[in-house]
Amino acid sequence: MTPALLPSSPLRLRRSLLSLLAVALGYFVLAKLSFRMPLQAVQVLPLWPPSGYSQSVLLWGGPTLAPGITLGSLWQTATSPHPHLLRDLLAALNNTLQPWLGLWLLNRVGFNAQLKRLTDVGALIGLAAVVPATLSATLGVTLCCLTQATAWATFSAAWFNWWIGNVTGVIVLTPLLITWRQGVRRCRQFYAPPLILLWVGILIALSWFIFCDPLRRQIAPYPLEYLPFPLVLWAALRLGPWGAALGTAVVTGLATWGIIQGMGPFLASTHDPVLAVLSLQAYICILAFTALILAGVVAEREAAKAALQVEKEKSEQLLLNILPLPIATRLKEDRTTIADHFAEVTVLFADIVEFTQISKDLSAQELVVLLNEIFSEFDQLAELHRLEKIKTIGDAYMAVGGIPDERDDHAQAIADMALDMQAVVQAFSDRSHLPFRLRIGLNTGPVVAGVIGTKKFIYDLWGDTVNTASRMESFGIPERIQVTETTYNVLKKDYDFEPRGEIWVKGKGAMRTFFLKGKRPGTTPP
């Protein structure tokens, strides 16, 4: 062990021991309270809260907290009126085995404690409640029969009471304890606390009237035990799994208290306390299953809806990376051909000089990385100057100012971008020690812009203005920005130029062109 770990090891050990003691104390208190219930009309609790507590603890902290459950169970039985060391030790191990088995089974199926999937709700009911309770009831009742605490003749009845008590304890208490963070997040929303308090108040008042009010039969002699269901289902829909768990716990707690005190509709419908408890347990299971499953379905649909929204936003963002926003909007609304005429725009073509020669010494991956780095910076410049990137063709870059939204300063914006592109390429060449040089051509005039075809859309330009801008680049000089006379006349008041004179341009003949040198000091940016 390294010296750096020595100071923290006692602290970690102390925290672990305190955690185990806290778990044991919680189990001891809950078990003691459960046994001290004033059972006036029945002799068995409709649910066993320690089972739900144990399962929640292991889902919170993992199997390392299992010894705390064992210690708490031993503590409770050791302080009972008739302690028996061997029996109490085996019972404690059985009480620990149940939540440990539930945790192991849930981990095997990828259980999520937020209960926002229907599969998680099903796993909690089946793998954390039904299956572990079956094992616990079998081992526990067998132990009681072997130690003569229970007669073998009553094995089946004792087994079922043990099993259903553990099942109801898990499905009522565990969801509430493992989803409490959802409740905290809900209460942080400014509108939620008053709404939640109002709902809880109405649910408590209604449940008390139905299950605990001795005068209820005189006031409303009707079977009203299913009246709280809409309130619990509303919570499942609006508050999620936490709301469903809280509503189930409130109704279950008051219904249990009512039957313990000898009141409520379940005892009123029959004079047999055993049948009354069975009816209540069936009621608890129906309520819990319905609320949790509904909450799981709604949460799953909400998650699917959120995921669909994310994918929709991704696809829309991808579309916006290909097409301008107005064009993308029109294309989604109308699939007909889009073609718009613009009276005056400025087109930019840029090309990396002798790129083929440079790429001979680079791998294909290095080549793509270099182009991506350079063109990504060009894209940022286009966004900065509010210009529209049209496309890249190999090592060439095309952008335009004045579309799809018309603007009066399109030529100035394109000129500024061209100057910035030269600076970017020079800085990149200095960093990479590669002889990158840029040749740029500009032209101003009318164009037609739009989207054609039905697949692999691209927003493109057509017209003589585009062809001339391309010629300005291809017949230009490296590290210079060549412009037509039309563009020169638009920019000459704010920018410095160097006349090149007349040059022969393929398809155009003799043309008078200029080199853009820079922006004059004090000129207002576009």
Image: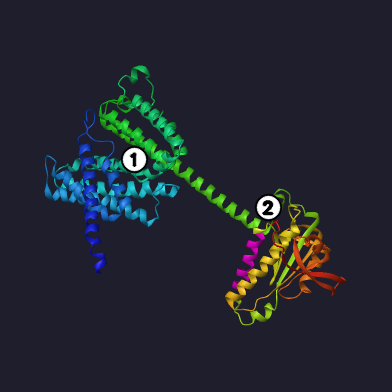
Amino acid, disc 1: Val
Closer to the eye: label 1 or 2: 2
Q: Residue visible at 30% across and 51% down?
A: 58
The secondary structure making up most of the magenta span is helix
Residue range (magenta): 367-383
The answer to whether residue 60 is visible is yes
Element carrying mark 1: helix
| Sequence-first disc among 1 and 2 | 1
Q: Nearer the viewer, residue 134 or 251?
A: 251
Circle 1 residue: 172
Q: Is residue 3 in the magenta section?
A: no
Q: In the image, 471: left or right of 178?
A: right
Element carrying mark 2: helix
Q: Position of residue 307 (x, y in %)?
A: 53, 51
Farthest residue to the right: give it: 509
Q: Position of residue 294 (x, y in %)?
A: 45, 41
Circle 2 residue: 325
Farthest residue to the front: give it: 522
